Amino acid sequence: MKKRFFLSVILCLLSLVWSGGAVAQDEEPKAVHRFLRAGGNSIAIVNEMGDTEWEYLLEPMQEVYDAWLLSNGNVFFSFKEGAREITVDKKKREVKADKDKGKSIVWEYSASKRAEVYGVQPLSDGLYLIAESFPNGQTKIYEMTNKKEIKKTVSIKLSGLAHEQARMVRKTALNTYLATQQRYGGDAMEFNEKGEWLRTMPGGRYAAVRLPNGNTVVACGDAHRVYEIDFWDKVVWEVKKDEIPGNPLGFVAGVQRLPNGNTIICNVPELNAAKNQPLAFEITPQKKVVWEADGATEMVKKIMSIQILDEKFQKAPYGPLR
């Protein structure tokens, strides 16, 4: 009788252990990422521990909104007065652009007087996309070589001053262009190769990213929202301002959709936000947070655009979806 009692106790304990293990296996594992970030007048590569491997500082007023790590190991980015491709010297933790004197600059495009550049993209055919916004509400999208030979120019009509136009312009696989307007109720819009308007995605004040299935992820800036819309303009997924505990949406900037279906959101906190609120975070399609870029981590600062550099994501089909 005693043997049966002790055996039943042991079986109960084992069942508790096994059930606990099953619950643990069902939990979403926390992710770690190495990433490129841009914001303010700074671009940096941050490792999995949150430490800065390399940083490039521009002059104080040269805001950086869009940056890419290229397959050749260089960084291509936009700043207020133009765009640059630079080398990444891993021996230097920090490079100050005003003291650089061309040592790391591979090539540079200078914007026209009173024009500003806030969107760039490396294209699959080896060309570089640069979006230059002018004070008259016109944005010109150039496709050029690294010798600054312009192969194509697409003129699109937006509204507002140069600073308020064309954040993070993207060319799609169908040779259309996605552009956003930052302020005054701005929207994301799609244009064809002739610069003709095709479509509006409401509230897209910062970024629009076309996915391989034809859907588009839209970041809404100070409208405090991210959503995914299908070809027929139906919202199929969204995140609202106070929907993610610990991560209320402030100014929603760059986004990246990962091959596993998760979404990285760059989130500039509002003025009254918690001091250490994450500046970027990753959520599953079910909106569970699995990674955060800690706002208190040294050198992370404001993040306006992000590119996850994990090897498995870099080699994914279609390239980074951001």
Image (tube, helix red, strand yellow):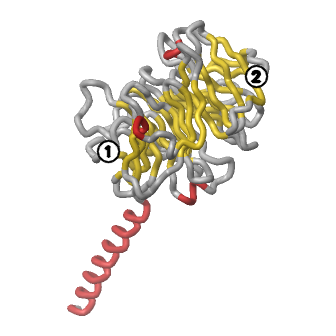
**Residue 11 higher or lower than 85, as above or below:** below
Type of amino acid at the residue the image marks with label 2? Asn
> Front-most of 303 and 226?
303
Residue 25 appears in view: yes
Disc 2 versus disc 1: nearer the observer: 1
Across and down, in percent, residue 44 comes to 42, 45
Type of amino acid at the residue the image marks with label 1? Met
**Residue 235 higher or lower than 123, as above or below:** above
Across and down, in percent, residue 19 comes to 36, 69
> Front-most of 146 and 282?
146
Residue drawn where x is 32% and y is 74% of the image = 17
Residue 290 appears in view: no
> Front-most of 297 and 145?
145
Across and down, in percent, residue 127 comes to 71, 39
Q: Residues within 10 Å of mark 1 (few under 14, many from 20)?
A: some
Q: Earlier in the sequence, mark 2 or mark 1?
A: 2
Q: Which residue is mark 1?
A: 299
User: Quick check: marks 2 and 1 in contact, CB under 8 Å?
Assistant: no
Estimate the spatial distance between the alpha carbons at disc 2 and disc 1, rounded to whole Å. Answer: 40 Å
**Residue 153 higher or lower than 238, as above or below:** above
Across and down, in percent, residue 198 comes to 73, 18
> Front-most of 37 and 199?
37
Residue drawn where x is 40% and y is 50% of the image = 291
Residue drawn where x is 63% and y is 54% of the image = 316
Q: Which residue is mark 2?
A: 192
